[in-house]
Amino acid sequence: MKHYPKIRLFTTAPLQESAQVELSKEQAHYLVNVMRRRENDEILIFNGTDGEFRANIISASKKNCTLNILEQTRKQQAQPDIWLCFAPVKNAPITNIIQKATELGASLLQPVITKHTVVTRVNTERLVANAVEAAEQSMRITVPVINEPMQLEKLLSNWDMERKLIFCDESGGGEHIIHALSRLEKHAKYAVLIGPEGGFAESEFALLRNKPYVVPVGMGPRIFRADTAALVALASVFSIVGDWDEKPGFRPE
Amino acid sequence: MKHYPKIRLFTTAPLQESAQVELSKEQAHYLVNVMRRRENDEILIFNGTDGEFRANIISASKKNCTLNILEQTRKQQAQPDIWLCFAPVKNAPITNIIQKATELGASLLQPVITKHTVVTRVNTERLVANAVEAAEQSMRITVPVINEPMQLEKLLSNWDMERKLIFCDESGGGEHIIHALSRLEKHAKYAVLIGPEGGFAESEFALLRNKPYVVPVGMGPRIFRADTAALVALASVFSIVGDWDEKPGFRPE
């Protein structure tokens, strides 16, 4: 088995063999001061569009670090188009939601403001940083898009009718999530919708039930916290209509 | 809809209508000093064997609190017999594993020491406290059993052959977890096995593959952290061979 560098970073720069890439100040600090990497040390780098590359450090100071791209280690690959729409919750659970949804492979994370949502201010920049870190560590070849929070009604008014919305209905009105998903098309566009701790308002239930693209589902008799529900529903979607037929082992070895 | 008290506590005392129950010092502190409850205020209480009851406070001081049991709010119910066997990980993820596994409904949590397990000392008492808190908050009618850590070989040497062990094989050798579970008996005895961050050793793979009760499974192409893998595998087991055909709404209303 070929040996790959342990450190893996995301960049927005274009990547190709022999190109040079300037890391951000924060990345230079992490690489040089925290991880004590020096000239000629190697890392992995990816940008979500050109694949993943092995690169070595050609110059490094405390605030700047330039890489030389050596060889491609993974080609870019299409990823499932599965979103997570979630009512923001308090600090630790929201970090948990971003991290786990990124590991699971969500392509887009949409904070949704509902009538019973208590947390309405979201530090989107911090959520992006959480997602990038989770993508770097989980070997994802992409980083999910993180949208600014949006009102539920506005989200639904612009909805793409081809994207089924898997609506986690904690009131017990939905069908067993696995049974419902088993009848749906594989590898299509999906989104999961998770409400706030206080549940959806009656008017929101009514709004959702009227939409032809909404699939109300249930996840058994127990009550889950919002972050648990998000993760479990997302995993169900990936397992039944996503790409779990594929196996790990994506490295050319 | 009937109104139920928001605070819900677990006790080891026997429970029946008109009985009196002495709370622990920690519970009295929580109820009286933190939540500011006084005489005649009501809470819910359960013990994992007699069901759940509404109770009111008949005497309260900073260190002692006595309840009078009023009426039963839920009968005791049999729960799925599904275990989680996991290699302990660092602090935050292990708390996450205990909390989420409790919400999902695991009946027993077994820390397992494997060759590549870095964390070998586990504060079992703290894990029990985490599980009790998660059970109280998630309306579970039971609290999972938390065992002391055990070596993998010892765990397997005493294994009940009727309990299928769903072995999360991050090397890609297993079948799609949902497909594998779909062929297995519903409502039977199950356990999920999750390895440490470093994976299983070759000798452990060999040991596991030789056991007739082991079902090697995979969860798609991406790499999950240990706590994510534990939660996702456990949710899959509950959804396919557990009790997700049941719905929430367990209160007599």
Image (cartoon, coloured by chain):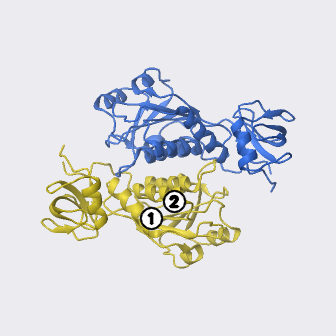
Chain colours: A blue, B yellow
- Give the side of residue B92 with respect to residue B68, left or right: right
- Res. B112 mark: none
The first of marks 2 and 1 along the sequence is 2
What residue is pinned by disc 1? Answer: B127
State the SS at label 1: helix
Q: In which quarter of the view is residue A81 placed? A: top right
- Mark 1: amino acid: Leu
- Mark 2: amino acid: Ile
Callout 1: residue from which chain? B
Asked if marks 2 and 1 touch (Cβ < 8 Å), the reply is yes
Q: Residue A146 or A220: which is nearer the viewer?
A: A146
- Residue A103, how many percent across, how many down? 59, 45
- Residue B44, how many percent across, how many down? 23, 57
For the point 85% across and 35% down, which residue is it?
A: A17
For the point 34% across and 26% down, which residue is it?
A: A207
View extreme (left): residue: B18
- Res. B94 mark: 2
Q: In which quarter of the view is residue B69 placed? A: bottom left
Q: Label 2: few (<14), some or many (≥20) within 10 Å?
A: many
State the SS at label 2: helix
Callout 2: residue from which chain? B
Up-down: is B208 above or below B199? below
Label 2 – label 1 distance at C-alpha:
8 Å
Q: Label 1: few (<14), some or many (≥20) within 10 Å?
A: some
**How many numbered marks have been drawn onto this rendered protein structure?**
2
- Give the side of residue A184 with respect to residue A76, left or right: left
- Residue B107, how many percent across, how many down? 40, 64
Up-down: is B237 above or below A70? below
Q: Residue B193 or A188: which is nearer the viewer?
A: B193
- Residue A96, how many percent across, how many down? 51, 46
Report whether residue B219 is seen: yes
Pointers 2 and 1 within a single chain:
yes
